[in-house]
Amino acid sequence: MLVDTHAHIFLEQFESDFDQVLERANGAGVSQILLPAIDVASVHRSLELADRHPALFAMAGLHPSEVKKATDEDFEAIAKLASDERIIAIGETGLDYYWDQSFNEKQHDFLRRHIRLASELNKPLVFHDREATWDLIRIVREEKEASSKPEQIRGVFHCFGGPADVTEAVMDLDFYMGIGGTYTFKNGGVPDATATVPIDRIILETDSPFLTPAPHRGKRNEPSYVRLVAEKLAEIRGLSLEEVANATTENAKKLFDLP
Ligand SMILES: [Zn+2]
């Protein structure tokens, strides 16, 4: 079995064929799908979906790009929802400098709040990083150093792309690395850049509907395609698909405390 640890299938892109998307995932051996939130509304939507489908699991968090317009009340709503026992992780949070650098300080502030919330609830974090890697790592380090329970600050760097020095820093923080569609891109360089990531630190993801793996690039991504990522990882690492599936599923179950 496989776990897609990162899929935004609560978005409107999946409204018309949601049940078929879940059927195809099931057919591809994907038995659990984790839904990282973007904003407060998406947490409610994910909880509704998780209540209806035992394969789906909800998270609570504000995506860094949403932080620009987010208020203290929004974060309070996230914090309240996060304590619900159905919420398996805090995310996605992190830093994104790619689109807009005008609110970096606010992103740092909200990131720290998410980290402290996760630590307080002892739930894992799901980090998004775009062109902000070393600031993200520095802030996680600072929060761990200041914490009386640093081992409760744990989680995954989603859509991980290396390189080796970042891998080393993420290992030092005791975090997992999420490998997805970019790993399959021809000339994308991700397999080389992540060559030092040990299999016991890897979990698989799609980031649906984005970052569709080869050979479906340009189309909508969906959880069944996590199998393509697993196959590529097996091919590059010289492992069987079963070995990759077993290892990454075990990692995901451990990190997210899945049934
Ligand atoms: Zn995402």
Image (spheres, rainbow, N blue to C red):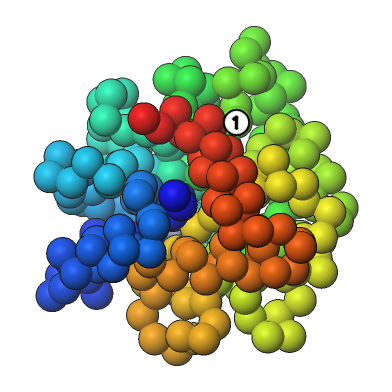
Nearest the camera: 144 or 257?
A: 257
Q: Position of residue 148 (x, y in %)?
A: 64, 10
Residue sitting at the far top: 148
Nearest the camera: 30 or 218?
A: 30
Residue 150, above or below 202:
above
Task: Categorize mark 1 by other alpha carbons within 10 Å: few (<14), some (14-19), many (20+).
Answer: many
Q: Position of residue 173 (x, y in %)?
A: 73, 34
**In the image, what residue type sits under mark 1?**
Arg
Residue 149, above or below 124:
above
Quadrant showing the C terminus: top left
Nearest the camera: 223 or 125?
A: 223
Instruction: Give the residue drawn at x 31%, y 63%.
Output: 27
Q: Position of residue 33 (x, y in %)?
A: 35, 51
Q: Quadrant of ligand 1?
A: bottom left
Instruction: Give the residue drawn at x 73%, y 85%.
Output: 187
Q: From the viewer's perspective, is 4 left or right of 175?
A: left
- In the rendered image, which residue does mark 1 sit on? 154
Instruction: Give the residue drawn at x 25%, y 52%.
Output: 42
